[in-house]
Amino acid sequence: MYELMILSLLMRGSAHGYSIAKMMNDMIGPVMKVSHGSLYPKLRKLEEDGLITATEQEQDPQGTRQVRLFTITEEGRRRFHELMMDTASNPGEYSRLFWQKACYLDCLHPAEQLELIDHYLNYCQVHQLHLKAVTKNVVESKAHYHAMPIPQLELTLHALRRAAGHWQVEAEYASHLREKVLAKMLAASE
């Protein structure tokens, strides 16, 4: 995930390591944080792989401190595109990953934007259908679930309905995002 985040940030322009860490922490915080101890080895690896380049710069007018300015390469742009279009990796974290990708959809062709959004909408619908089926099973099942004490059964149903509501909100927002992309495509074709 950090690889995509770093490349995404550099798609917008060159940045220093400190700026990259700050932006990443703003995106993933407040519970998770990327440390400089984990970021700089990742930057070094991306540089070794030819996905980014680094140039030394002076940070202050006196030249007392050197910093590295990171820039994405053409190979890095290809890798960014590959990671953006990947819908098979990280299935358990796909929701969080999709919203990270959504911030950089404008770096993709509109048809690719729709492809990602439609995939996410399908992902949301699969979750909704699964939760609906499980909820129905809990309500109608005579064997397992009705052996539960009433408070436990009610809590289980509440948790299932809350999860279904979460996926409904996700689908609605993704649908709104899809409408915006379609509107831009329509405006560009006129």
Image: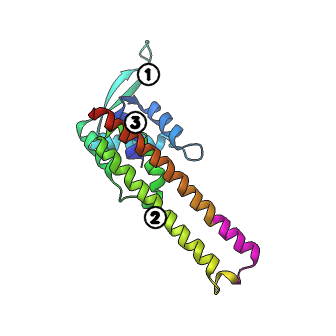
Q: Secondary structure at mark 2?
A: helix
Q: Amino acid at mark 2?
A: Val
Q: Secondary structure at mark 3?
A: helix
Dot 1 or dot 2: first in sequence order is 1
The residue tagged 2 is 126
Q: Secondary structure at mark 1?
A: loop
Q: Residue at x 39, y 29 (%)?
A: 15
Q: Residue at x 29, y 49 (%)?
A: 82
Position above or below: 149 against 155: below
Neighbourhood count class around disc 1 (C-alpha, 10 Å): few under 14, some 14–19, many 20 upward: few
Q: Residue at x 44, y 50 (%)?
A: 97
Residue 153 part of the magenta-drawn span: yes
Q: Residue at x 56, y 43 (%)?
A: 29
Give, as a single range, the part of the protein colored magenta. Answer: 147-159
Residue 89 part of the magenta-drawn span: no
Marks 3/2: CA distance?
31 Å
Side (left or right) of 155 relative to 39: right
Neighbourhood count class around disc 3 (C-alpha, 10 Å): few under 14, some 14–19, many 20 upward: some
Dot 3 or dot 2: first in sequence order is 3
Q: Is disc 3 in contact with disc 1, using a CB cutoff of under 8 Å?
A: no
Residue 50 visible in image: no
Is label 3 or label 1 in front? 3
User: Residue 9 got which mark?
Assistant: 3
Marks 1/2: CA distance?
53 Å
Q: Position of residue 20 (x, y in %)?
A: 44, 34
User: Residue 65 got which mark?
Assistant: 1
Neighbourhood count class around disc 2 (C-alpha, 10 Å): few under 14, some 14–19, many 20 upward: few
Residue 79 visible in image: yes
Q: Considering depth in this image, is 175 or 58 the residue closer to the camera?
A: 175
